[in-house]
């Protein structure tokens, strides 16, 4: 999927070599369930914010990335990642100390639920979601990865000024943009991958790394203007610009548009490297399905980015 002819990045981003992304077969039912809950439960600052959230069709990022997943598990994955989007926007308007207090409360809700009373709507939404996840085996790593992502919004050194190279940034960005969550969700949502072993995961790690870099930097390409505006509006502490385009521009001393072009070339180069490694591995059965699932994380995230209005 390469976007509508009118998309502003159409001329900047060449077509992908990856297979076309597909939506989960239960897309409409899952989207309706999750969106109804979030729209009616989140405390919206205004009707405008609520309508924008609805129009962005954020559930598509999950339903493109995990089309082979069991419906009830994908529904929970969708609720978690969309709640993450809401928290991301909420944190951009706060100080780091306020964010740290909120995340500390969420850690307590996960680790000591019997001793922690939800106080805010954010607490209550997370407490309920954590409880639903934990009725399933092997779900704790997903929730731990989710809170690690939120922790990134509490880092005093957050932003390109503290990240001296793109390599350093990629390590930080993997967690900041939620890639470890998506890694865990692939194996958790797909029943055919439930028995995958630690050794098999280690074998797949080079492919996971390429996928994480691909999704992270392509997201930065699409979201640069939105993140730049948020950083400008919200000041240095709460709204630090965390974007690979800005990091690369600063590192090599070029303008933003030139840096964005280089980021796009990196993304497509990672695709070729992925295809090369995939061919060398010669995997079959469950491992082949896992490799295809990792590939769908890349193509699915890109399909969502072309379709959503969040970054326009």
Image: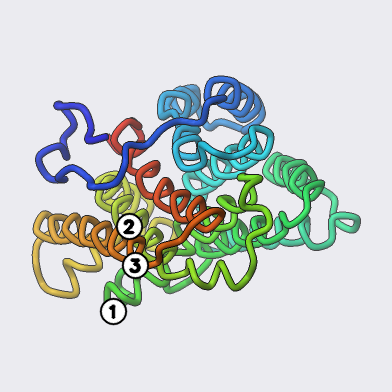
Q: Nearer the viewer, residue 171 or 103?
A: 171
- Do the residues under discs 2 and 1 have CB atoms within 8 angstroms? no
* Secondary structure category for the residue under label 1: loop
Q: Is residue 105 visible?
A: no
Q: Does residue 144 appear to the left or right of 150 in the view shown?
A: right
Q: Which mark is residue 164?
A: 1
Q: Mark 3, residues whose alpha carbon is within 10 Å: few (<14), some, or many (≥20)? A: few
CA separation, marks 2 and 3? 20 Å
* Pointer 2 or 1: first along the chain: 1
Instruction: Give x and y (percent) for residue 160.
Output: 31, 69
Foreground pick, 269 / 113: 269
Any mark on residue 195, and which? none
Residue at numbered disc 2? 214
Query: Looking at the image, is 103 positioned above or below residue 125?
Result: below
For discs 2 and 3, the disc positioned in front in the rendered view: 3
Task: Characterize the local packing of mark 1: few (<14), some (14-19) or many (20 or more) Cα atoms within 10 angstroms.
Answer: few
Mark 3: secondary structure: helix
Q: Which secondary structure lies at badge 2? A: helix
Q: Residue at x 58, y 38 (%)?
A: 78
Q: Which quadrant of the figure contains the C terminus?
A: top left
Circle on res. 280: 3
């Amino acid at each position: 999927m390469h976007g509508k002819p009118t998309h502003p990045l159409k001329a900047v981003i060449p077509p992908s070599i990856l297979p076309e992304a597909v939506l989960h077969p239960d897309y409409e039912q899952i989207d309706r369930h999750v969106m109804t809950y979030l729209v009616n439960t989140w405390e919206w600052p205004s009707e405008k914010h609520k309508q924008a959230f609805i129009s962005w069709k954020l559930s598509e990022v999950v339903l493109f990335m995990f089309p082979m997943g069991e419906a009830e598990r994908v529904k929970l994955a969708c609720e978690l990642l969309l709640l993450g989007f809401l928290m991301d926007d909420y944190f951009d308007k706060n100080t780091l100390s306020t964010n740290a207090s909120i995340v500390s409360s969420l850690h307590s809700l996960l680790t000591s639920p019997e001793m922690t009373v939800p106080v805010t709507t954010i607490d209550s939404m997370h407490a309920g979601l954590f409880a639903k996840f934990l009725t399933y085996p092997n779900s704790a790593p997903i929730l731990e990865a989710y809170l690690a992502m939120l922790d990134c919004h509490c880092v005093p050194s957050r932003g390109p000024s503290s990240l001296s190279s793109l390599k350093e940034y990629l390590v930080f960005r993997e967690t900041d943009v939620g890639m470890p969550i998506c890694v865990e969700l692939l194996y958790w949502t797909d029943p055919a991958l439930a028995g995958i072993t630690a050794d098999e995961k280690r074998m797949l790690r080079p492919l996971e790394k390429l996928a994480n870099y691909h999704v992270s930097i392509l997201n930065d390409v699409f979201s640069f203007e939105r993140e730049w505006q948020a950083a400008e509006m919200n000041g240095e502490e709460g709204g630090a610009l965390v974007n690979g385009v800005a990091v690369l521009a600063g590192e090599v001393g070029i303008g933003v548009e030139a840096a964005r072009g280089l980021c796009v070339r990196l993304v497509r180069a990672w695709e070729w490297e992925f295809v090369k490694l995939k061919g060398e591995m010669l995997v079959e059965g469950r491992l082949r399905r896992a490799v295809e699932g990792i590939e769908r994380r890349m193509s699915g995230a890109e399909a969502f980015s072309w379709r959503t209005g969040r970054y326009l």
